[in-house]
Image: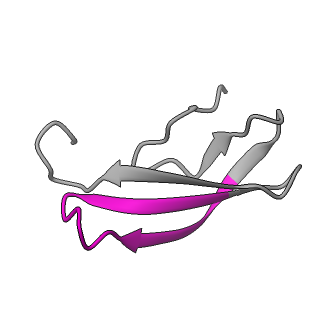
Amino acid sequence: MSLPSVPTRTDAAVACGCGGIARITAVAPIPSRPDRMRHVYRCAECGQDLVFEVMKKGVEGNG
């Protein structure tokens, strides 16, 4: 299984630049972007947090 470099709203893990795997730790709304959510992932290998803005469910172009 290959991990995505940029996650979709359902991805529980992403690849980190260190070669490790980052797992989701938080999901939060973005007040200035009502069509998106902020997903935070933490790498188990290096401890880095990876933050992505992900389209919400039901937003056009996102199933």
Image location of residue 17, percent across then percent down: 75, 34
- Report which quarter residue 61 is drawn in: top left
- Report which quarter residue 44 is drawn in: bottom right
Is 3 displayed left or right of 28 in the figure?
A: right
- What range is drawn magenta here? 23-41
Give yes or no for residue 31 being in the magenta stretch: yes
Q: Residue at image x 63%, y 48%? A: 13
Is 49 displayed left or right of 39 in the figure?
A: right
Image location of residue 55, percent across then percent down: 28, 50
Is 56 displayed left or right of 43 in the figure?
A: left
The quadrant of the rendering that contains the C terminus is: top left
Q: Residue at image x 23%, y 62%? A: 33
Magenta span main SS = strand
Give yes or no for residue 26 being in the magenta stretch: yes
The quadrant of the rendering that contains the N terminus is: top right
Q: Residue at image x 50%, y 36%? A: 6
Image location of residue 16, percent across then percent down: 73, 39
Position of residue 30 relative to residue 47, above or below, is below
- Report which quarter residue 36 is drawn in: bottom left
Farthest right residue? Answer: 45
Image location of residue 21, percent across then percent down: 76, 44
Q: Nearer the viewer, residue 13 or 38?
A: 38
Position of residue 6 relative to residue 30, above or below, is above
Position of residue 20 relative to residue 56, above or below, is above
Q: How is the image coloured?
A: one colour
